[in-house]
Image (tube, grey):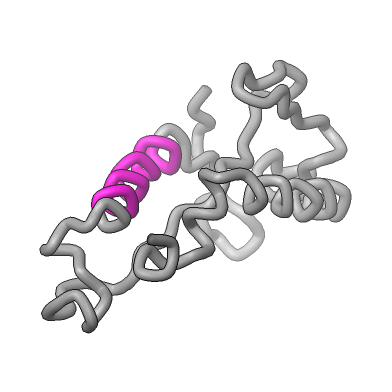
Amino acid sequence: MIQTPRRDATGRERGSPEPFAYESDFGIRWVAQSQRQGAAELNFDPARGPVQAPLVRWGPHLQAQGPNARQIDGLTRTQSDVRADQLDPSEAGTKRTTALLPAFFKNPSGRAHLVPPSLSA
């Protein structure tokens, strides 16, 4: 659901960045995957030839659709996970997200984002 932007106390527009935030993540993910697969135009490692790009990393997707469990891992979000603006994480939501990160980086997909491709071969 796209929320209509609203103005906060400073006059800035506030509102959900969706669907743009979700959709733009695909482009970043594809660039990171191509670099990990050795695309020459995305080389970051001088030992492998001319540097063409910075090292690109991809992180976990921590969004969930409220109480509806994600199919991939069952992640849900509760009302207590967000502030009154329904966008920013609450203290409880921040703690919950922080607790999820170690699991992401321990699985093989997440580990690939910690270890540079030149060291994982």
Q: Is the stretch drawn in magenta largely helix, strand or loop? A: helix
Kindly indicate the quadrant of the structure image that contains residue 61.
top right
Residue drawn at point x = 36 percent, y = 46 percent = 29
From the viewer's perspective, is 14 left or right of 33? Answer: right
Name the spot of residue 55 as percent of width and height, x first.
34, 70
Q: From where the camera sits, is residue 6 visible? A: no
Residue drawn at point x = 26 percent, y = 57 percent = 35
Residue drawn at point x = 43 percent, y = 43 percent = 21
Number of numbered discs: 0
Name the spot of residue 54 as percent of width and height, x first.
29, 73
Q: From where the camera sits, is residue 96 visible? A: yes
Name the spot of residue 101 as percent of width and height, x first.
70, 52
Kindly indicate the quadrant of the structure image that contains residue 108.
top right
Q: Nearer the viewer, residue 41 or 115?
A: 115
Residue 29, magenta (yes or no): yes
Q: Residue furthest front?
A: 121
Kindly indicate the quadrant of the structure image that contains residue 73.
top right
| Figure check: 51 above or below 41 | below
Q: Which residues are magenta?
A: 20-34
Q: Nearer the viewer, residue 17 or 66?
A: 66
Residue 74, magenta (yes or no): no
From the viewer's perspective, is 65 left or right of 4? Answer: right
Q: Nearer the viewer, residue 113 or 30?
A: 113
* Quadrant (top left/top right/bottom left/bottom right) for the C terminus: bottom left
Residue drawn at point x = 42 percent, y = 33 percent = 19
| Figure check: 28 above or below 52 | above
Name the spot of residue 11 as percent of width and height, x first.
55, 60
